Image (cartoon, rainbow, N blue to C red):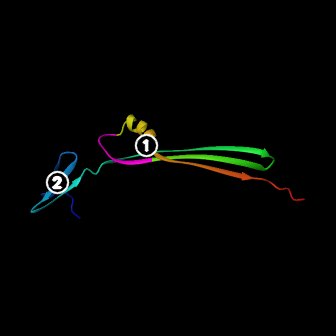
Amino acid sequence: MKYYGKEGTTIFGDGKFYWVEDGNSNFGFSNPDFNILSFRSNLIWRWEYHPESTIYLVYQQNKYNFENSTGKVDFDIFIDSYKVKGNNSIALKMSYWLPVD
C-alpha cells in the first residue's frame, strides 16, 4: 500500500481540487469532504375509542440532502436541514376487538 504525500510523492491543491505527483505519474481528484443534511421525525396519535379497539395515525417526515462541504459544520447547517426537500408519509391503522363468547 502506498501513502501519498510520503516517500517522494507530492500533494497540492486549492481546496476544491487536488493533484498528486508521484515521480513520472500524476492524477487529480476533487475535494473529498461532504456534508449530509438530514431531519427525520415521527408523530403518532393513538386513540382507544372502544375497549381493546384502537386507531393509530402516524405522520413521518424524512428530509435528506448530500452536498460537498464548503467549511466546518456549524449551527447554520443544522438550520439548513429543516429547509431540505423530503418525503412526508401518513398511515392510518384501525383495529376493532370482536368479543367471542
- Give x and y (percent) for residue 52: 79, 50
Q: Give the magenta range.
A: 64-72
Residue extending furthest toward the bottom: 1
Disc 1 is placed on an element classified as loop
- Give x and y (percent) for residue 29: 22, 55
Q: Compared to 23, does 61 lie above or below?
A: above
Question: Any mark on residue 9, and which?
Answer: none
Q: Is residue 69 magenta?
A: yes
User: Which residue bears the numbered disc 2?
Assistant: 19
Sort mark 2 into few (<14), some (14-19) or many (20+) by Cα contacts within 10 Å.
some
Residue drawn at (78%, 53%) of the image: 96
- Give x and y (percent) for residue 99: 85, 56
Which image quadrant is residue 3 in?
Answer: bottom left
Relative to 85, 100 lies left or right: right
Relative to 32, 8 lies left or right: left
- In the foreground, 3 or 68: 68
Disc 2 is placed on an element classified as strand
- Exactly how many numbered labels are in the figure? 2
Q: Nearer the viewer, mark 2 or mark 1?
A: 1
Residue extending furthest toward the right: 101
- Give x and y (percent) for residue 97: 80, 54
- The answer to which of marks 2 and 1 sits earlier in the sequence is 2
Viewport quadrant of the C terminus? bottom right
Viewport quadrant of the N terminus? bottom left
Residue drawn at (20%, 50%) of the image: 17
Q: Amino acid at mark 1?
A: Val
User: Which residue bears the numbered disc 1?
Assistant: 84
